[in-house]
Image: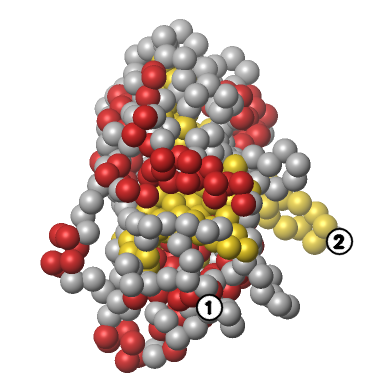
């Protein structure tokens, strides 16, 4: 997925979120058409690489109290809106966007074998009384309908090169004139053919912003071999704004193989959005992660996994929160794991205490060291182990009974989500409200730089879940990213 195109989509989404006055409840009822019923769909040519569809009614993120506290906020958002439109080659002059745009938008990209970059097609609906002149504001008036018009601006960069207005008030603009012609032909033949994403829209009818692609954004945790994108699969990503958070949810879908939104109900349940989860939660067969754990765990955990992974293939739960961490796994009576054999703990002293059926152990080490004729005491981090029932926990802090019960419940809830026939199930949930950058959404660093003095976007939470069972040919892959809009 090209960064420039994704940046345009995000910026246009923000424009819709922030650019308009609040819509009245009555108007919302009038404009509640499902995406699959939008007339704009007929203008989408086939064989697109990426497709973004929106019928969002924009609203103002600021209430009156916030405007009074910081009156420059609204001016800043106007600056964002004008910057986006200028980049595209649109000049509204004295017009207001909310008086022109009529709540339907598509953005699609297409392969261009002659160029290194993809071509882009943008279609949106305007109010019946508006014209191309209201969009371009050129010295010479343009009032034609059904004529492809080049966009030429002296001493200005315009991303779009051609524009066209249909009889039913749709504006078609593109970097390539041929794409506008294909869009027109598509509308003429729409009743004779099936919409490319008709099956994938099942379960998404009430969404206001949907992005269809044939590949995920780069993942730090899932290997590319898991999803190649060459099997007729599509990735549907929905965009929503709640409490000043932009929420992106992505699903791998394949209508022919009955992988639809409803298939994800069990995979994404209430446990996955538990606010009590620590900053980093990972549940997996550790062999599936390898080097991808490096950004999240410390040296001891890495060394533990290296030794533990040599002869084991068990489900692992990793919890990280600030400086506290713990690792949970099921005990195997036939192949018991002896923590004392770890190289990291070779010279540590072990003390064990049994309470009822639970076994508590501590590994500690204090030594004296001479440096520059001075004797100093060196204390190493204590390591704790708890064995209770079917579980064993290893951590850097002592865990009481209530916490163990909570961790145990969390572990077995996650395990129950793993289908018995699944040979692959992993979940990575990363929360950190202190990020000042999009840590696991790095493709948008340039976007952050573009608007950093006006709008701050930071990563609040990243969630990735993958499940693959026999005899399924394709895995279920879900990704959720929550971005703070400040």
Q: Any mark on residue 141, and which?
A: 1
Query: Residue 128's x, y, as percent?
Result: 32, 67
Up-down relation of residue 441 to residue 310 (above or below) = below
**Marks 2 and 1: CB-CB under 8 Å?**
no
Up-down relation of residue 16 to residue 480 (above or below) = below
Q: Quadrant of residue 340?
A: top right
Q: In the image, which is nearer the foreground, mark 2 or mark 1?
A: 1
Q: Quadrant of residue 220?
A: top right
Residue under the image location 34 percent in, 14 percent down = 420
Query: Residue 301's x, y, as percent?
Result: 58, 37
Q: Which class describes the residues within 10 Å of circle 1: few (<14), some (14-19), or many (20+)? A: few
| Mark before the other along the chain sequence, 2 or 1 | 1
Q: Quarter holding the N terminus?
A: top right
User: 5 or 139, which is in the foreground?
Assistant: 139
Secondary structure under the numbered disc 2 in the rendered image: loop
Up-down relation of residue 141 to residue 359 (above or below) = below
Q: Any mark on residue 366, and which?
A: none
User: Is residue 60 at least partly visible in the picture?
Assistant: no
Q: Residue furthest right?
A: 372
Query: Residue 235's x, y, as percent?
Result: 46, 36
Q: Quadrant of residue 391?
A: top left
User: Is residue 163 at least partly visible in the picture?
Assistant: yes
Judge left or right: residue 263 versus residue 51: left
Q: Any mark on residue 372, and which?
A: 2
Residue under the image location 61 percent in, 30 percent down = 224
Residue under the image location 41 percent in, 25 percent down = 254
Q: Quarter holding the C terminus?
A: bottom left
Query: Residue 408's x, y, as percent?
Result: 32, 32
Disc 2 and disc 1: Cα gap in Å?
85 Å
């Amino acid at each position: 997925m090209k960064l420039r195109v994704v940046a345009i989509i995000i910026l246009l989404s923000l424009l819709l979120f922030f650019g308009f006055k609040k819509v009245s409840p009555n108007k919302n009822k009038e404009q509640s058409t499902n995406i699959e019923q939008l007339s704009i769909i007929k203008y989408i040519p086939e064989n697109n690489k990426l497709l973004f569809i929106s019928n969002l009614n924009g609203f103002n993120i600021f209430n009156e109290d916030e405007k009074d506290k910081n009156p420059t906020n609204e001016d800043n958002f106007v600056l964002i809106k004008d910057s986006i439109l200028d980049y595209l080659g649109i000049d509204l002059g004295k017009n207001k966007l909310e008086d022109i745009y009529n709540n339907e938008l598509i953005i699609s990209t297409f392969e261009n074998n002659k160029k290194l970059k993809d071509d882009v097609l943008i279609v949106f609906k305007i109010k019946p009384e508006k014209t191309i002149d209201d969009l371009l504001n050129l010295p010479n008036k343009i009032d034609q309908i059904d004529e492809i018009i080049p966009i030429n601006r002296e001493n200005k960069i315009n991303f779009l090169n051609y524009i066209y207005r249909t009889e039913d008030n749709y504006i078609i603009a593109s970097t390539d004139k041929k794409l506008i012609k294909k869009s027109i032909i598509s509308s003429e033949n729409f009743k004779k053919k099936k919409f490319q994403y008709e099956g994938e829209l099942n379960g998404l009818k009430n969404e206001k912003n949907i992005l269809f692609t044939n590949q995920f954004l780069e993942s730090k945790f899932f290997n590319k071999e898991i999803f190649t994108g060459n099997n007729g699969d599509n990735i549907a990503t929905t965009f929503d704004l709640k409490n000043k958070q932009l929420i992106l949810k992505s699903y791998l879908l394949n209508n022919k193989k009955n992988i639809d939104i409803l298939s994800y109900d069990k995979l994404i349940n209430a446990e996955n959005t538990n606010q009590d989860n620590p900053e980093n939660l990972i549940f997996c067969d550790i062999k599936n992660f390898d080097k991808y754990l490096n950004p999240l765990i410390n040296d001891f955990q890495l060394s533990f996994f290296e030794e533990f992974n040599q002869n084991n293939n068990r489900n692992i739960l990793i919890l990280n929160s600030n400086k506290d961490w713990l690792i949970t796994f099921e005990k195997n009576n036939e192949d018991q794991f002896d923590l004392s054999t770890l190289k990291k703990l070779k010279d540590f002293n072990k003390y064990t205490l049994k309470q009822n059926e639970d076994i508590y152990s501590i590994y500690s080490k204090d030594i004296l060291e001479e440096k520059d004729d001075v004797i100093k005491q060196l204390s190493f981090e204590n390591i704790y182990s708890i064995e209770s029932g079917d579980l064993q926990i290893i951590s850097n802090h002592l865990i009481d009974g209530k916490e163990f019960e909570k961790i145990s419940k969390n572990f077995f809830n996650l395990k129950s989500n793993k289908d018995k026939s699944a040979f692959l199930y992993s979940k990575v949930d990363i929360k950190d409200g202190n990020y000042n950058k999009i840590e696991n959404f790095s493709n948008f660093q340039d976007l952050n730089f573009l608007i950093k003095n006006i709008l701050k976007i930071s990563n609040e939470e990243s969630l990735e879940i993958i499940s693959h069972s026999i005899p399924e040919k394709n895995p279920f892959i879900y990704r959720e990213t929550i971005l703070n809009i400040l």
